[in-house]
Image: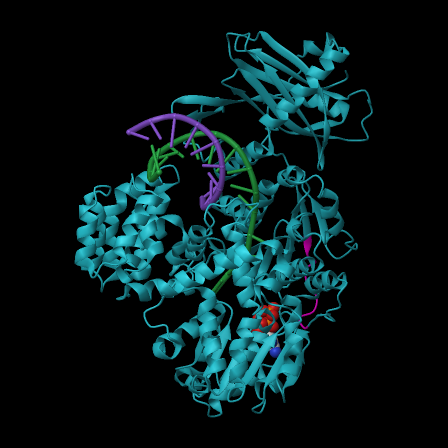
Chain colours: A cyan, B green, C purple
Amino acid sequence: MTINQLLSDLNENQRKAACMPRQHALILAGAGTGKTKTIVSRAAYLISNGTPAHRIQILAFTRRSASEIVERVRMHLGEEAQGLKASTFHTWCISLIRKAPKVFGCKGYSVIDRDDQLQLYKVLRGKAQKSELPSAQEICDLYSFARNTVQSLNATLQKKSPECLHNIKKISEVMLAYEKRKKERHYLDYDDILDVVAQQMTVSEKTRIWVSSQYDHLLVDEMQDTNPLQWKLINPLKENVTLFCVGDDAQSIYGFRGADFQNVHSFASRVDNSITLKLQDNYRSTQEILNASNWLLSQSALSYGKNLTAMRGSGKKPELHTFINEWEEGRWIAEEIFNNKQMGEDWKNNMVLVRSGYAGRVIEGALLAKDIPYQFIGGTKLLESAHIRDLLSVLRIVGNQQDEIAWMRFLTLWNGVGEVTANKLIERILFLDGYDQVIKLLKDSDKLPLSAADAVGAVIKNQNNVSDALLDSFQVLEEILAEKYKKQEWDKRRRDIQLVRKLAEKHTSILGFIEEYLLDPVHVTQIDRKENDDVVTVITIHSAKGTECERCYVINVSPGSYPSSFSIGKEDEIEEERRVLYVALTRAKDELFVTRRGYSLWAEDKSKVDDNAESENYFLNALPEGLFNEIIHRHKLWNVDNDAPDVTEHVDVGINIGNIPPDPQEEEAEESNASDWNHMVDNREAFWLSELRCADGYLHRSNSQSKSHKDSAGIAEELDGDKMVKKKLQIERNKQMENHSGIKIESCSAYYDTKKNVCVFGELIAENKSPVNEYKEVQLVVYDSDGELMAREYTNWTEFGLMQSFDFNVDLSDFEMEPSRIKVYPTNG
DNA sequence: AGCATGAGTGTTTTT
DNA sequence: CACTCATGCT
Ligand SMILES: Nc1ncnc2c1ncn2[C@@H]1O[C@H](COP(=O)(O)OP(=O)(O)OP(=O)(O)O)[C@@H](O)[C@H]1O
C-alpha cells in the first residue's frame, strides 16, 4: 500500500492531523475514532516526506501497542520504515541510559521491579506494628505515587492517606533509607528509570541537547494516561522536537499511577504555539454499542462532551445478562464462544474483558473446561511468578554480585537458612572480590548444602548463554523447588521453566535478558502460541486500552464492582471507574455482551454496611429501557438432573407432623445452631466448591492435596490423602410436588462429612402464582442404604439474591450406617 | 534464636 | 494463590 492510499483511507480531520505542518499538536478524540490509525499515518506521512525514520520516536503505553504501530507503518512503507522506533516510556529511557551510562550516572545499575522494591522496603521498614507505621506495601505505593506525580511526600499523604500524616517523619525515614540502599546497591526502580533521564535533562542543557538532537518528532499515544513524571520527560524536548500527542480524556484510567485526566487539557497552555484537533467519528462500533457507552458517560456529573456517532451505522443491540454466580457466568460465556466457533467464527474474534487479573481466573477455568484455546493478558506475569523468581535469583547473583535482594531470595531457598542466616552471609558476600571467593564462601558455610555453590557455579560457567545457564542451574535447584512448591501445582510451574528458557534462547547477557523482560512483561499464556494465533483473549481492561475485537464480553458488571467498592466515597475514583467501564464497552466492534451476577457470594460478607453504598453507586442502576436486551439466567447451579426419576411414593407427606413450635429455650439453641451452619457453608467454602466444580465437573478443593473421583453411582468423594473428608450425596426431588406448590428447587447439594453431619444447601424459586400458599417450608428426608428412615427435617427459606435459599445441618452421629438417599421437597408445614 | 510449617485471610488496575 | 501470623521444633 502506498502512502497516498493510506491517506485516502482517512477522513478529513484525520488527514489534516496526519499531514500537519511541523507544529506541536494534540489530537483529542473519542474512542474508536482512529487515533492509533492517525498516529500510524502521521509517522508514514513524515517518513515519506523526507523525515528519516530513525528521527521519529513513538511513545506508547504498552509494548504491544508500540510494536503494533511500527508494524502497521512498516506494512505501508516497507523498507523505508526501517529504523522507526516505538517504545514504552520505560524502554525508551532505559535505552538512553544504556546508550550513555556516564551521562546519567547509572553505569552498571540493574533494574528492579515492583516486587524487589517491596522486598527492600520490607527489610527497611522493620517489624513495627501496622498501627505504628503503614505496611511496606503502602509505603511503597506512596513512594511511587509521589514520584510519579512529582509531588512532595507531604502532599501525597494529604491526598492519598491523610490518616498517616502524623507519621510522616517515620515514613520519610524509611523512604530515605530505601533510596540510600538503592544507591549503594546500584539499583534502579521503575520510577528512577524515568526520573534519572527527566532530571538530568532538566538540569543539564548538554543532556537536553544530546537527547533532543536525536529526534525531530515525538509521537505520544494515550496522552491522557501520562503522569507528571512523564511530562517532565517530554517537556524539555519540546524546544527541538515536535510533539504529536493523541488522547481521550474519557479513557483516562491510570489515575492510580499519577495520571490526571484533566492534564490533557493543559496541553495548550503548557505548549506554546500548539494546535488542538478533534476527531469525532467512530469507525469501530455499531451505533447500538455507542449508545450504551454514550449513556454511561452522560450519567456522570462531569461533562465529557462525548457523544460518539457510528460511521458503520446500526447493528446488533448489546445484551445484558444476569447470572446467579460467576461460574454460571463463565460457563455461559464459554458456551457462547464455543457455539460461535461451531458456526464458523474464529476464536480470536472473542475478547473477554475483566477488571482484575483475579477475576479472569473463573473465565480461564470455564474456557479450559471446554478446551477453548485462550491467552490471558494481565495479572501476574511469567517472570513475576514466585518459582521463576527463585530460579532467576541465581542468574541475578552472577550478573550483579551486589544484588542483595537476589541473594536473599536465593539463600533462603535452602532448608535451614532463613532471613537471619542469609543476612549474615550477604554481609560477607558483598565485600568479596570475584566469584571464586563467593563460591568458596558458599561451600564453606555449614548452613548451606553443597548444591548451593553448584547452582551458582552452573551459571558462572554459562554467562554467555542464558538459556543454558537456566537449564544447568535448574537441574541443581529442581529438587528443592519441587519440594517448595509440591503443594502448589509444581507440574505447571515446571513447565514454566521451559517457557523461560525459550524466552532466553537468543540472549547472551544475563542482565540484558532480565532487564528486557522486566520492562516488557510476558504473560504466561502468550509464549507458547506463536503458530497458533487463533485464540480467545482474556484481558484486563487496563491492558485492553487501544485494542478492539468483534465480540466483547465485559464480565461482572455488578454492584460493588462497577464502581469497585474500593472507590466508594471518593468521587474522582468513582469517575475513573466509570471510564474503566467506558473503555471496556467501547472495545467492541460488532457485538457487546455485558454480564453480571445478581448475587455475589463475596459481596455479602465483605461489608454489609457498604451494601447500600455499593448499590446506590452502581453504574447500571438507572439503565433506561432499550439500550440493552436484558436476559436473566436462572440456571441450575449444580447440575440438578432434570431426568432424575420422579419420586411419587412419599408416604411421608401423609404423616407430616408439621412444625413443632419450639419452646423459647430451644429456639435459642436452634438459632445458634443456624449460625454455626452459616459458618460451615460460609462463603469461602461455597466459593471453592463451585469454582472447581466449574473447572472439571467434580468436587474438590485445590489447596488441600485432595483428589476427587466419581464412583459409578455418581457420587463424588473428597479425599485428603487417604482420609475421606466429605462425600457428596445424591438428591432426589419430587417434581409433581414442586409443580403443585409452585416452588421450584433450582439447585441443591448435599454432603456427608467425617463428623457424621449431613449438610444440605440449596436454592429455590417460589413463584408467586403458587395456588397453594401454605407451602412455606422445605422438607429433607434422609435414608440409609437399607431404606430405613434416618432423619426428617423442615426449614424455611430466606431471600438469596435472585432466589431463595435453604439449608439443613443434620447430626447423624447416633447412626452406625451412612446416609444413602436423601429427598428434598417443598412442604406445607 | 532462628526456622519450618500450617492455618487463616484477603485479593484492582501497570511500567 | 500469596501473604501474614502463631506455633512448635531444633
Ligand atoms: N477513516 C477511517 N475509515 C475507516 N475505518 C477507520 C478509519 N479510521 C479508523 N478506522 C477504524 O476504526 C477502528 C478504530 O481505530 P483506532 O484503533 O485507531 O481508534 P482509536 O481512536 O485509537 O481508539 P481507542 O481510543 O478506543 O483506542 C479501527 O478498526 C480502524 O481501522
Lateral position of residue A780 relative to residue A49, left or right:
right
Q: Is residue A331 visible?
A: yes
Judge whether A94 appears above or below A54 on screen.
Answer: above
* Ligand number 1: quarter of image: bottom right
Number of numbered discs overlaid on the protein picture: 0
Which residue is more in the foreground, A1 or A195?
A: A195
> Which stretch did the figure color magenta?
A311-319
Q: Quadrant of residue A32?
A: bottom right
Instruction: Give the left or right position of residue A740, taking residue A93 as reference.
Output: right
A318 inside magenta stretch: yes
The quarter holding residue A214 reads bottom left
Query: Which percent across, then down, holds residue A460?
Result: 20, 59
Residue A541 position in % (x across, y down): 57, 59
Q: Residue at x 71, y 70 (%)?
A: A308
Looking at the image, residue A637 lies above or below residue A451: above
Q: Name the residue located 50 percent from the left edge and 35 percent from the top edge.
A: A697
Residue A659 is at least partly visible in this image: no
Q: Is residue A789 left or right of residue A653?
A: left
Give residue A468's position: percent from left, percent from top.
23, 57
Which residue occupies the foreground of this view, A118 or A295?
A118
- Give B10 or A208, whichever is nearer the viewer: A208
Residue A680 coordinates in the image, percent (x, y):
58, 26
